[in-house]
Amino acid sequence: MTKSAVLSAISILTIAAGFAICSGALNAGGLVINSFTAVPDCVFPDPRRHILSFRVSGGIVRVRLYAIHRGGRLREFYSQPASGPSMAASGVQDLGAASDIESYLLRVTGEGGAEIRRVLFFRYRHSAFDLIPPAFHTRVTSGAGTLARYHTHATILNVDSVTCSFKFYGRIGGTSGRTGRAAIVTETDPDTVQCDIRWRSVRQANAAGTVEWTAWVTDRCTQGRITRTARVNEIR
């Protein structure tokens, strides 16, 4: 057999082995993974949350669960010896739940060293941006008095940047709205998100309307951005 043929055969065996591990469709030594499930993903990491359930059968010696973190780090968090010809568990907790987990691995070891595995892909959410009512509307009276500030408390977690805009309920002076300068204020408790806009007139700065904040995040569960809106009253 030529060197290229040997390499090709090794590649085929590697792919086949990988499929068997991920799908859990094959059994070994009479071991069978009947089910391996999780709650819907994109939840926040919580060590108290009941995440995984499984059911296995055959000549079982031990069942283990691992978390696979980003970069391939493997962390064992569950290990139980056999209690009969079949084993099942529901609502297993991961006390080390973290946002960089990419999947969970079920590993079943049987008599004579036989082993079967299954990988369950799972995403944790790690970004949050939620406004806490009410929203406030103030105007800086120094200078021209046309700088309006819209602000509210917010739950902010792993946000890369924030943008904002404001829209009047009706056109004022030929203008329907404008983008502003957004900022996150961490000196308050809880945090505050604000939007500053320099208007052309005091009437515009005082007007009621809707402010919109968009938080840009790096999170596979939120499609890159989270948008929130709040209504503010007119300053009289």
Image (spheres, rainbow, N blue to C red):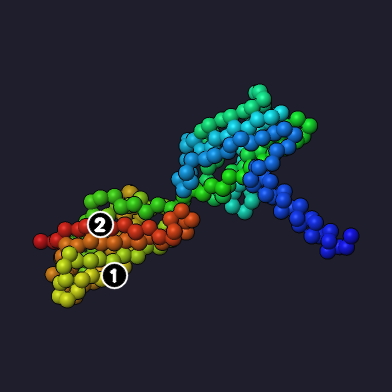
Q: Which residue of the protein is positioned furthest toward the top in this rendering?
A: 84
Q: Secondary structure at mark 1?
A: strand
Q: Which residue is mark 1?
A: 179
| Numbered circles on residues, count | 2
Residue 95 in sight: no
Q: Which residue is mark 2?
A: 230
**Is 1 located above or below residue 37 in the figure?**
below
Camera-nearest residue between 76 and 117 = 117
**At 74% from the left edge and 53% from the top edge, which residue is drawn?**
14
Q: Quadrant of residue 231?
A: bottom left
Residue 126 pos. (x, y %):
46, 51
C-alpha gap between disc 2 and disc 1: 15 Å
Residue 179 pos. (x, y %):
29, 70
Residue 190 pos. (x, y %):
33, 49
**Is 216 located above or below residue 126 in the figure?**
below
Q: Which residue of the protein is positioned furthest toward the left in this rendering?
A: 236
**At 67% from the left edge and 25% from the top edge, which residue is drawn?**
85
Seen in the image, is 20 located left or right of residue 212? right
